[in-house]
């Protein structure tokens, strides 16, 4: 385990990377370690890893026959609210978007977070500049209705990573269950897994989670973190994240048949691909200095958080480097750790 600790120790630069917490687990061994300004018990924002929790619920409902992934989303959310959100070359495709399209990032809906708005800036630009703000689904849909979709839903195997998809999925879950997304997560995930430290961040006065870092500065954006919801609002710990990813992979929510069926990969941005509610990281052999060039399936977040399973080593990895400005750091760290695991 000393080699693992050394890798993590040397990844702390006390400039951008001020703290790292990591857990690895396989059948015969486990490892948990923290270095810098974070502990193994510390709660942190898992950011877009939240999407995996949303996927778990939809995949469970689909396997139980309570919905079909090919159902159009207008079956679950007001058509009036959705009207005009996807207009491509003069045709309104809003009513043709399915649950599958949202989960698999194939809806073609623009990303409300990264897409340029009327003022020429993205919401991400404003947030990273320290302009903390609140939004809801209605504002999200208004923003994207003024952006140009890159393709129609399900078009030619295309995919576009868009946080908008999961904002909509969050509202759909609330409509299906007739309660808040907080309560949906409690009912379907947090309570069944016995979580005591994992929750959806909604209270802007809550300063318990580890503060986010952007470059050399702390990024204090509680309004934004409380607005992400289904696309990035969960707070957890390295140990409870480990419990979740193992449950996701090992049949707690749905069968192995379903797990295999969602691994139909479409490129989103190199070297990440997206399946149905799950992401895949795999470097081509020519780019990777590590052997056996491991594939990782799971999800990561803009905060530097991650929860992945490595099939070739039957190993699970969770944790965070808690740095927004260096999105590749988590993946480099995971590959280094797996190389000596």
Image (tube, rainbow, N blue to C red):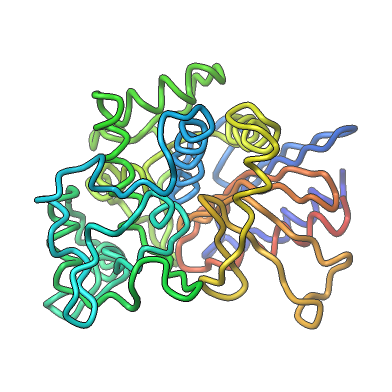
Percent of width and height locating residue 328:
59, 68
Depth check: 12 or 277 in front? 277
User: Is 191 displayed left or right of 31 in the figure?
Assistant: left
Q: Is residue 327 above or below residue 202?
A: below
Q: Quadrant of residue 222?
A: top left
User: Is 145 displayed left or right of 156 in the figure?
Assistant: left
Residue at the image point whose x is 28% and y is 39% from the top: 172
- Total numbered labels placed on residues in the image: 0
Percent of width and height locating residue 145:
16, 67
User: Is 275 displayed left or right of 96 in the figure?
Assistant: right
Depth check: 83 or 167 in front? 83
Residue at the image point whose x is 33% and y is 72% from the top: 152
Mark yes or no: residue 19 visible. Answer: no
Percent of width and height locating residue 265:
61, 63
Q: Quadrant of residue 241?
A: top right
User: Is 239 displayed left or right of 24 in the figure?
Assistant: left
Q: Is residue 81 above or below residue 156?
A: above
Mark yes or no: residue 150 visible. Answer: yes
Residue at the image point whose x is 51% and y is 53% from the top: 322
Depth check: 255 or 249 in front? 255
Q: Quadrant of the N terminus?
A: top right
Depth check: 224 or 92 in front? 92
Percent of width and height locating residue 82:
17, 54
Residue at the image point whose x is 23% and y is 57% from the top: 95
């Amino acid at each position: 385990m000393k080699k693992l600790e050394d890798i993590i120790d040397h990844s702390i630069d006390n400039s951008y990377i001020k703290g790292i917490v990591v857990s690895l687990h396989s059948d015969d061994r486990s490892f948990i370690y923290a270095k810098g300004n974070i502990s193994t018990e510390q709660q942190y924002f898992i950011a877009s890893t939240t999407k995996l929790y949303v996927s778990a619920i939809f995949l469970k409902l689909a396997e139980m026959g309570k919905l079909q992934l090919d159902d159009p989303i207008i079956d679950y959310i007001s058509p009036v609210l959705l009207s005009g959100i996807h207009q491509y070359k003069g045709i309104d495709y809003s009513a043709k978007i399915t649950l599958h399209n949202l989960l698999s990032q194939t809806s073609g809906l623009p990303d409300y977070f990264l897409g340029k708005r009327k003022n020429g800036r993205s919401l991400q630009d404003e947030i990273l500049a320290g302009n903390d703000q609140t939004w809801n689904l209605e504002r999200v849909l208004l923003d994207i209705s003024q952006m140009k979709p890159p393709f129609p839903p399900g078009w030619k195997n295309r995919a576009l990573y868009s946080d908008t998809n999961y904002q909509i999925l969050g509202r759909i879950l609330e409509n299906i269950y007739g309660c808040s997304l907080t309560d949906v997560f409690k009912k379907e995930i947090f309570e069944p897994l016995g979580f005591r430290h994992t929750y959806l961040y909604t209270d802007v006065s809550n300063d318990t989670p580890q503060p986010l870092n952007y470059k050399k500065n702390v990024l204090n954006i509680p309004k934004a973190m409380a607005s992400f919801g289904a696309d990035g609002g969960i707070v957890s710990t390295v140990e409870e994240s480990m419990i979740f990813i193992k449950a996701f992979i090992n049949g707690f929510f749905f069968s192995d048949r379903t797990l295999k069926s969602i691994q139909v990969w479409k490129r989103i941005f190199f070297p990440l691909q997206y399946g149905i509610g799950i992401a895949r990281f795999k470097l081509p052999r020519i780019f990777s200095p590590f052997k056996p060039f491991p594939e990782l399936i799971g999800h990561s977040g803009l905060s530097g958080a991650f929860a992945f399973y490595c099939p070739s080593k039957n190993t699970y990895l969770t944790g965070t480097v808690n740095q927004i400005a260096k999105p590749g750091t988590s993946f480099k760290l995971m590959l280094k750790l797996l190389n000596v695991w």
